[in-house]
Image (spheres, helix red, strand yellow):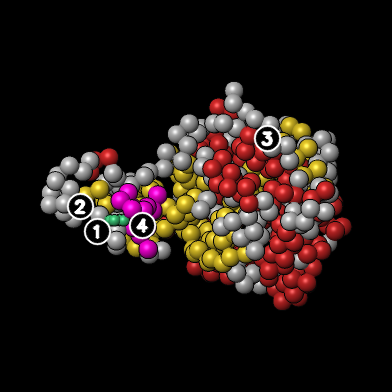
Amino acid sequence: MGTSTKYQVIDPVNGLLDRRIFSDAGIYQEELEKVFGRAWQMIGHESLIPNPNDFFLTYMGEDPVILTRDAKGEVHAFLNMCRHRGNRIVRADDGNAKNFMCSYHGWTYSNEGKLVSVPGLQEAYYGELDVDSLGLVSVAHLDIYAGIVFATWASDAPTLKAYLGDARWYLDTQFNRRDGGMQAYGPMKWTQPVNWKAPVDNSSDNYHVAITHLGSAIVQSQALGRPRTSHEGLFKSPAKHLSVNGHGLTFRMMEANEPRRGHGVTKYNLHLFQEYQQDTLPEVERRLGSFRAQHVQLGNHSLFPNGVLGFRLALPQGPLQTEFWHFSLVDKEAPEEIKRALRTGSQGNNGAAGMFEQDDIDNWRQVSESGRSPVARRYPQDLSMGVGHASIHPDYPGMVSERYISENNQRNYYARWQEFMNAESWADIHIDPITASFEGTAGMRG
Ligand code: FES
Ligand code: FE
């Protein structure tokens, strides 16, 4: 097919990575087209537009996108660009509107994307404007997984179900547990002087936790009674990494009735979380089957190309600038106390004021900038940890690492990026076959 070999940036055998992919302006421009122009991307959550005529302003790469729910309840996504001269037609972050009027000359579009009004259509355009062909530019495909809205500009893209593939087997254990679905709070937004790929690859990097986050972990353990992280604990952990279609996931195998861990759980409220877990177990077992309900907990993870630790986005704004959007997602039907603890826990760790987030950003900045110097560029990044120590596992789908601390997922992420950058179309991009058995009633839509 049309695959080129222009990009040879990652050597999967020795794990060496070309640093220029973090800082080169030409590479960045090509990413906007070849990665963000064709990948499925998370753009919102159904709970952000719960009512007819709600809208939410979002992004795909650098392109502003309006996510709408029309009067009939159907969800759409359009480029936020007036077809006349290119103004953004929506300026508010969110709201409720049947129509959107461009503030330059007043062309007006419905929330289904149709051009419904043009000032001077007869007087100035002589009735000759082809109004039907000048609706808003729609994404090629939009689909929803467990309330999370995804879209792609590529008409030849595979289905979202195929794109997520076996990753969904693990994602379900966090995002698809309850009949009532999840509620998104946010986003909290801030800019970081980092390349957008650095936080994504870091999502599977548990090697750094005991060093980078030492101070924050000590504070949390003293104030909240959360367990301390140590190299010893991380190296011995039976948790694992796995990779599917460039998505990098980590997960923990749990004993039956073992408490699920997460940001927001402290020694003071652990009993509430355990009660909630027990109370909801029959429902979760019905939805996910008892093996996943009881024994699998999704850990840190990324979704290709720019999903970071769940429904949180690294939006590119140049090779060395990223706007970060932090949402927290909680079970809609959880008790208020649990929801509050999860929200504050999520923000305390990973929001703009999150202690762990702040620890991380300086690392990502330095990693991103290391590609700027011609001298530094002669020395590739070393991602060799665990080469040759990942394989197909009999119980857990995906390419699963033998050990928890591994750079298996990072190598696969950059190999996926390279595959996108060299491909002429989706025909040149492979999709791992779905092999997982999805027990239970939970499906793509919830
Ligand atoms: Fe939108 Fe002219 S640019 S109406
Ligand atoms: Fe971190």
- Disc nearer the start of the sequence (4/3): 3
Residue where numbered disc 3 is placed:
6
Residue 5 percent across, percent down from the top left: 68, 31
Circles 2, 4 touching at the beta carbon (< 8 Å):
no
Based on the displayed image, in which of its 4 quarters is residue 435 positioned?
top right
Residue where numbered disc 1 is placed:
106
Does the rendering let one see residue 421? yes
Q: How far apart are marks 1 and 4 (CA)?
A: 11 Å
- Disc nearer the start of the sequence (2/3): 3
- Disc nearer the start of the sequence (1/4): 4
Residue at disc 1, CB closer than 8 Å to ligand 1: yes
Q: Distance between the residues labelled 4 and 3?
A: 35 Å
Circle 1 sits in a helix, a strand or a loop, which is it?
loop
- Is 379 on the left or on the right of 180, as rendered? right
Circles 2, 1 touching at the beta carbon (< 8 Å):
yes
- Disc nearer the start of the sequence (2/1): 1
Is most of the magenta stretch helix, strand or loop?
A: loop
Give amino acid for label 2: Ser
Circles 2, 3 touching at the beta carbon (< 8 Å):
no
- Disc nearer the start of the sequence (2/4): 4
Q: How far apart are marks 2 and 1 (CA)?
A: 8 Å
Q: Residue 117 carries which label?
A: 2
Residue at disc 4, CB closer than 8 Å to ligand 1: yes
